[in-house]
Image: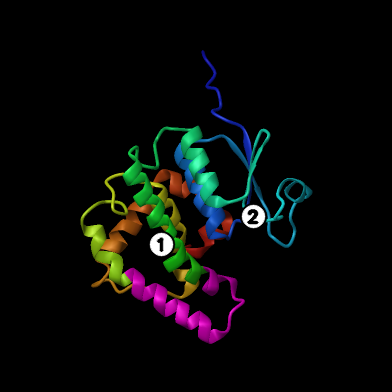
Amino acid sequence: MGVVAKRSSMTFFSDGSDQYSHRVRIVLAEKGVAVDIVECQDEELPEDVAALNPYNSLPTLLDRELVLFEPSVMMEYLDERFPHPPLLPVYPVARAESRLYIYRIQRDWSKHADIILRGEASEDEIETSRKELRDSLVAVSPIFAEKPYFMSEEFSLVDCCIAPILWRLPAMGIELPEAQCKHLLAYMDRLFDREAFQESLSEAEREIRE
């Protein structure tokens, strides 16, 4: 009887409550990568991170001699290193469009999630971000009527960036109106039901929706 070889061995230093660490964990799970996930917090980083990462930040991905410390670079590296299933389109125009979607998610959604979840801003700033994020999600809901994933028939890196934000809505005090957001809510169900998404969740993330 043959032994199934592991596809890779790498170490991922991950903050179990952080949306950016979560993005990368989703990609790792989708690819079925054998990885040692080390849970840690910015306040108590392992010495390895300080030695490897010039910014002493999370997440940090170590693959043999390669050290990566920017989530988007990690995600694209993993997609190229483990081509199946592909999480970016093959053609340059479509790939560029996907990268722009990720950029816009960062500018339009992720920044608001950071303001709300990190709790470092004033109450007024948090409330403004909460309203802007909610309104933006409500406005974008109709596009999910057309395709099962974000502007795509296939699950992609764009969805890997959106899923951690949507999973954290209860923690941000955001409730989406069912009548206006039925397509977005159905999309959320599709994301959260994926086996890889469930595998990606840390204990802290599971508690958000328990």
Q: Is residue 92 visible?
A: yes
Q: Which residue is mark 1?
A: 104
Figure check: 84 above or below 44: above
Q: Secondary structure at mark 1?
A: helix
Q: Is residue 44 magenta?
A: no
Query: Residue placed farthest to the left in the image?
Result: 146
Q: Secondary structure at mark 2?
A: loop
Give residue 141's quadrant in the image.
Answer: bottom left
For the residue pair 8 and 16, the one nearer the viewer reads as: 8
Residue 159 is left or right of residue 75, and the answer is left
Figure check: 56 above or below 136: above
Q: Residue at x 31, y 63 (%)?
A: 185
Q: How far, Cα to Cα, is label 1 from label 2?
A: 22 Å
- The range drawn in magenta is 114-137
Q: Amino acid at mark 1?
A: Arg
Position of residue 18 measured from the top left corner of the image (x, y, whole percent): 57, 60
Q: Residue at x 62, y 49 (%)?
A: 69
Q: Which mark is residue 141?
A: none
For the residue pair 72 and 3, the one nearer the viewer reads as: 72
Q: Residues within 10 Å of mark 1 (few under 14, many from 20)?
A: few
Q: Residue at x 39, y 42 (%)?
A: 88
Q: Which mark is residue 58?
A: 2
Position of residue 148 measured from the top left corner of the image (x, y, whole percent): 27, 51
Residue 100 is left or right of residue 6, and the answer is left
